[in-house]
Image (cartoon, helix red, strand yellow):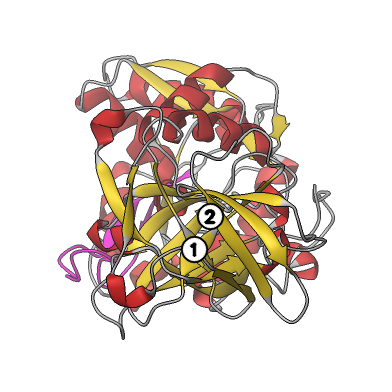
Amino acid sequence: MAFMDDTPQEQMQKERMDRVNSKHRGQSVEDCKKCFKLICCEDEEGGKWCLRARIDMSSDNGTMRDPVLYRQNVLPHHRAGRTTYKAYPTYDLACPIVDSIEGVTHALRTTEYNDRDKQYQWIQETLGLRRVRIHAFARMNFMYTELSKRKLTWFVENGYVTGWDDARFPTIRGVLRRGVDIKALRSFIFGQGASHRIVNMEWSKFWADNKKAIDTRARRFLAIDKADNVKLTVTNVPPKEDNAFVITDNLPKDPSFGKHHIRISKKIMLEKVNTEGITAGEEIVLMRWGVIKITKVDRGLEGEYIPNGDFKKAKRKVSWMANVAEQLPITLYEFDNLISKEKLEEDENFKDFINPNTLATTEAIGDFGLQTLQKDDIIQLERRGFYRVDQPYMNVDKGLVLFMIPDGKSKAMSGLTGKLAHR
């Protein structure tokens, strides 16, 4: 049911296309065994030969026209590093054998393998193996994204990403590092079902589902841009020397998540984008603290704290930080898609549509409750968005590193649009 063949690759492809039998198709068993031993040693002559199945060269299904089953490969194994074996089965031969032996009941294969299903079944039947049922489903594609392993490998090898767990990569490790909740990921995949129709999904639906999952457990903290901020003097609160603070819930909707302290002082810093157009007499809300009435806007902002102020009356809610020496350094990472075109056509080269701006960072400062965070924790910075902890705070030289998590919206919270597309 098989024979050894040394036909050059290009000629073999042409013969299969033209449905022409190989000159070795009628090879004897003895000659076949002799040539197979050649490919199982390091002999250069063995490199010319391969094992081919003898099926049906007249078949309309090209995968049934005597496919290659075994080839010589003398390179060290990519994982074990050893050279014990000199020849290896092809994917087409290995899969039906392994699936049957290891007890697989249903082989889940994408529709691109439909032509190979008959070959898969032929191998199991010919070798007397237990039959495995095949369940086909269509690939799920995403806009602005390449899912081909070969093309993703090119991004890694050419330094466009840091590795297979890069937060810009559409791999399981990549999206988890970006901040995807595992339960949300599983729920999203189950929700799509096993359709036979290829779909092109938008990332916004994926991230919106993820937000619903993380919103219920993401603790809330404050942080502002280290460089782009505005100073405000609150005239009727203690100076920084008094070490005054307020106590706030980590998650206002669920007190079981505990509380943390936030420093307050006479001198505070506000997000600049939140103060544009502010006027004297206006009341603003400092998140997690209270209401401030602005009394002066010329040559620096001044205001006074209003005890028991009306939060609903104030239209402007602002992130802030006490202007004190003890500040927690944070680096905020934003990411964008590696491909700049929504959907690539079959005749288009993905290398012509590589996005040159896929990574941006912002230096920020945050409240000291962020010191307690551990790697992979997911939080929300008020008025900014959701983040995953990629590196916890170590010291002033090794500050907190947070990866921004898209929330499915085209615009970010509160006008803080960031440096890249919010997706």
Task: Name the N-terminal-most of marks 2 and 1.
Answer: 1
Q: Which residue is label 2 attached to?
A: 305
Amino acid found under the numbered disc labelled 1: Asn
Query: How many C-alpha atoms fall within 10 Å of the one at disc 2: few (<14), some, or many (≥20)?
Result: many
Q: Which residue is label 1 attached to?
A: 236
Amino acid found under the numbered disc labelled 2: Tyr
Residue 199 in which image quadrant: top right
What residue span does the magenta drawing correspond to?
Answer: 68-89
> What's the magenta bit mostly, secondary-structure-wise?
loop
Circle 1 — which element? loop
Q: Which residue is located at x 36 percent, y 82 percent?
A: 325
Circle 2 — which element? strand
Mark 2 and mark 1 in contact? Answer it, CB < 8 Å. yes
Q: Which residue is located at x 50 percent, y 39 percent?
A: 308
Nearer to us in this view, 297 or 11: 297
Q: Give the number of callouts.
A: 2
390 vs 112, left or right, is left
Residue 340 position in % (x across, y down): 77, 60
Residue 136 in which image quadrant: top right
